Amino acid sequence: MKNIVVLVSGGGTNLQALIDAEKSGIIQGGRITCVIASKPGVYALERAASNNISTRVIPRSEYADVAAYTKAVTEALIEEKADLVVYAGFMTILDEQIVKAFPYKMMNVHPALIPSFCGKGFYGLHVHEAALAKGVKLSGATVHFVTEVCDGGPIILQKAVPVENGDTPETLQRRIMEQAEWKILPEAVSLFCQDRIEVVDGIACIKE
């Protein structure tokens, strides 16, 4: 049984999707053992506590720079014996220390079809604002491994979601969460925990 540690910074809707998926048996071969937050008082911590999942808070504000903060988070993940690290609305950028410690063992969900609308500056509503400004007819979500390149790691799963007339960034964000993010993130986690993802030449392949 693999230990899944989830990194959060806010309300934890993707964390809730993972908790629900574990309870319903969608996630096979792994369990959420710890939730680590980048600031105190966020609702994701309450979600974890109400489901008897241990929590840790490592406040970004208490560290002088990214290197010091990354070191603290990496050490916590090692202490928690994390087999898989999931970024679930974790809004703090970490440096290459953590990638070296957990190569192809960290995944993130991004609210667009990478390589569109991704990279530095594309987070939260900014992603959906950019998609609507471009007039795309399809958007969606991508689960990918975390590497040194922001949103540049091997793509594990993607799901397309239609953009509808009259969409606002908020309505598009909600539809993508409900129809894509909350479905493919638990699925990707389950695939990892079953040892069914293999990275070959920078491409993530799903084994049957």
Image (cartoon, helix red, strand yellow):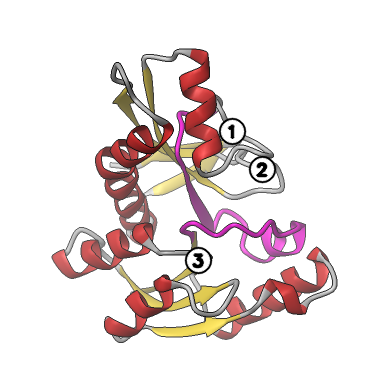
Q: Nearer the viewer, residue 208 or 57?
A: 57
Q: Position of residue 179 (x, y in %)?
A: 25, 39
Residue 2 drawn in magenta: no
Residue at x 53%, y 84% (from the top left corner)? 56
Q: Position of residue 139 (x, y in %)?
A: 39, 25
Q: Nearer the viewer, residue 95 or 178?
A: 178
Q: Position of residue 67 (x, y in %)?
A: 82, 67
Q: Nearer the viewer, residue 161 or 172?
A: 172
Task: Judge the density around disc 1: few (<14), some (14-19), many (≥20) Cα neighbours within 10 Å.
Answer: some
Say which element carries label 3: strand
Precedes in sequence: disc 3 or disc 2: 3
Residue at x 67%, y 80% (from the top left corner)? 75
Q: Is residue 148 above or below residue 116?
A: below
Q: Amino acid at mark 1?
A: Cys
Q: Quadrant of residue 118?
A: top right
Residue at x 71%, y 78% (from the top left corner)? 72
Q: How far apart are labels 3 and 2 at the CA level?
A: 17 Å
Q: How far apart are labels 1 and 3 at the CA level?
A: 19 Å
Contact between labelled residues 2 and 1, with CB atoms less than 8 Å apart: yes
The quarter of the picture where the N terminus appears is bottom left
Judged from this view, the residue extending furthest toward the left is 24
Q: Which residue is mark 3?
A: 8
Left or right, residue 100 beside residue 189:
right
Q: How far apart are labels 1 and 2 at the CA level?
A: 8 Å
**Magenta stretch?**
87-114
Q: Which residue is mark 2?
A: 150
Do we see residue 158 in this rendering?
no
The quarter of the picture where the C terminus appears is top left
